[in-house]
Image (cartoon, rainbow, N blue to C red):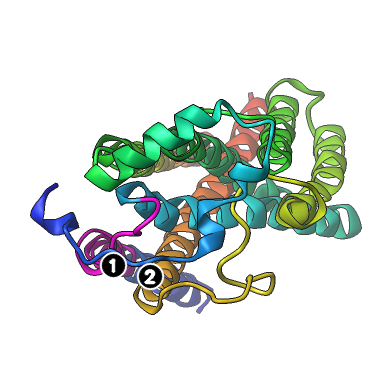
Amino acid sequence: MSLIIKQHSKLTSQLVNWTLFILSLALIIITLYLIFINVPTDANLGISQRIFYIHVPIAWLGMISIVVVAIASALYLWTKNNKWDDLAYSTAEYGMMFATLIIVTGAVWAKPVWGVWWTWDSKLTTTLILWFIYASYLILRAYGPKGIQQARYAAIIALIGAIDAPIIYLATQWWRTAHPSYVVGPLESSGGLDPQMRTAFLVSMITFTVLYVFLLSNRYKIRRSETELDELYQEVLIIE
Amino acid sequence: MPFFLDTQPVHAHNSMINNIENESFADPQQNVENESTDNESGNNLGYVFAVFAIVWGLFFAFMILLIRKQTHISSEIASLKQLLKKRENP
């Protein structure tokens, strides 16, 4: 009976995984169509404004990742269940990737618009701090003390690091900044975004979020398999 | 400009131009003015494609890496389980 349930849950998991994969691909195609064919070119920023549709969703995922890492870490500290630690670790890897992409895509967009690749602007600097938070988290996971101690130290880094997410978000409100103010969301400035641009932006946000869920669920499964592998190796050593 | 990018220009929103004109820490104003001329002529195509290539390239590379890692771990788990089974029931 338990074998049937196990097989059923495995099949369901595979089905969900494939659905997410196909959905991601379909959404990527729609997003690319909207960005390159459907949306109008911005009269002020020209073609480079199209970077917006990719830069902002990535920034959203980079910031949401540190929040997920912090929540999972808090749950790990509370419950001592390794599943939460695995989720935190898997998310941190993606967080690092997205933080790198935020900085790279931002720099490439800054060059034609501002004339510089980088400036020590509050938004950019706080994002760079986020990158360093992810880097320190992953360095600790790679080279820090092993076992429970490592997971605890990493959880504390994540909890402290999560403070940076609202700071990044509110940087344009709190400090004088060269970074554009918000054109969508709760801090949206009056006027908003052109309707076609708004649609493309929202579709792009959905696309990246679905892709993120797909990638994260797979990375989490791999992390669980890695834990299982470690346990099996320990069993082999005990028998020997 | 390629046909697929040749859409009717609109003003997205003034805030997207950013406040750089009022800022002193950004690089020379001269650069901003020169680049805005480039924007109008659509010379920033290279930057757009660079961003899209980097992002999607990294995504797909990471996905391939994940698949390979999963395959490798699964086969390692299977062989270890087999080994354990053999040792328990020789």
The relative height of residue A82 versus residue A185 in the rendered view (above or below) is: above
Residue type (three-letter) at the residue carrying disc 1: Val
The relative height of residue A163 versus residue A109 in the rendered view (above or below) is: below
**Which residue in the protein does label 1 denote?**
A39
Q: Position of residue A80 (x, y in %)?
A: 85, 53
Q: Position of residue A158 (x, y in %)?
A: 79, 44
The answer to whether tags 1 and 2 share a subunit is yes
Q: Secondary structure at mark 1?
A: loop
Is residue A183 something that shows in the picture?
Answer: yes
Magenta includes B74? no
Q: What residue is shown at x 32% (from left), y 44% (from top)?
A: B39
Mark 2 chain: A
Name the residue nearer the viewer: A93 or A208.
A208
Q: What residue is shown at x 27% (from left), y 62% (from top)?
A: A25
Name the residue nearer the viewer: A179 or A76.
A179
Residue type (three-letter) at the residue carrying disc 2: Met
Q: Residues within 10 Å of mark 1 (few under 14, many from 20)?
A: many
**Which residue in the protein does label 2 denote?**
A197
User: Magenta region: which residues?
Assistant: A23-45
Q: Quadrant of the C terminus of chain A?
A: top right
Q: Position of residue A94 (x, y in %)?
A: 55, 45
Using the numbered discs, state the Cα–Cα distance from disc 1 to disc 2 in whole angstroms: 6 Å
The label on residue B58 is none
Q: Secondary structure at mark 2?
A: helix
Q: Position of residue A60 (x, y in %)?
A: 58, 57
